[in-house]
Amino acid sequence: MRIYTRRGDDGETSLSSGNRVPKCHPRLVACGALDELNCALGILRLHLSEKVRASQSLERVQADLFAIGALLAGPGDAELPHPLWPLEAIEAEIDRLTEAAPPLTSFILPGGSPGAAWAHWTRTICRRAEREVVATQLPVPPGVLAYLNRLSDWLFVLARAENALNGQAEFLWKV
């Protein structure tokens, strides 16, 4: 199989249903944001320390993002190919990671250790991907939007835990 097909040279591409759409179609914009998020998660995995114990969770999230992307590229009435990481489990991880960091008393500026900085950047990509999925105005299965919303929260506390567990001070926002 060749990687190039030349079918997209005119600025259109095919959804999995076979329908041709412009490459700027909201579904493709959302799929692109999810793909970018997935790539950023792959880089984040390289930079996180083992202390936060998040490698398996990150791998799970990457698989979940592929499932959401496949759903968006489909006919619009399909179901997810596999269940997403349950919200209760994400929230338990958020609670676990929150305990590793000092109490939040101020807004913090993204940064700190390389792993934390990548987690913060990945969080912003996640927020954009969430907005792009909303912009498709597709009736996504229950839980998809909540999943993306909770995922960005998880990435925020992941960044904070990465800094705390590695003795890196956070940069506080000062007015």
Image: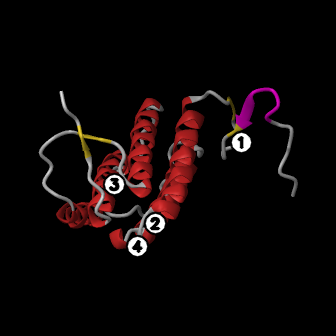
Residue corresponding to mark 4: 50
Residue 94: give x, y in percent of width and height: 25, 60
Residue 12 forms part of the magenta stretch: yes
Q: What percent of the width, then of the height, locates residue 46?
A: 52, 63
Instruction: Tell how many labels.
Output: 4
Alpha carbon separation for disc pair 4 and 1: 43 Å
Q: Is residue 105 left or right of residue 49?
A: left
> Alpha carbon of mark 1 to alpha carbon of mark 2: how far?
28 Å
Residue 117 in sight: yes
Q: Quadrant of the C terminus?
A: top left
Q: Which residue type carries mark 4?
A: Glu
The residue at which mark 3 appears reads as 159
Q: Amino acid at mark 2?
A: Arg
Q: Secondary structure at mark 3?
A: helix
Q: Which residue is mark 1?
A: 18
Q: Foreground mark, 2 or 4?
A: 4
| Kind of residue indicated by mark 1 | Gly
Depth check, mark 1 against mark 2: the one in front is 2
Taken as a whole, is the magenta stretch helix, strand or loop? loop
Q: Which sits in the foreground, 169 or 15?
A: 169
Quarter of the picture holding the N terminus = bottom right
Q: Nearer the viewer, mark 4 or mark 1?
A: 4
Q: Earlier in the sequence, mark 3 or mark 4?
A: 4
Marks 2 and 4, how far apart at CA? 16 Å
* Residue range highlighted in magenta: 8-13
- What residue sits 36% from the left and 46% below the top? 111
- Tag 2 secondary structure: helix
Which badge, 4 or 1, comes first in the chain's sequence?
1
Q: Secondary structure at mark 1?
A: loop
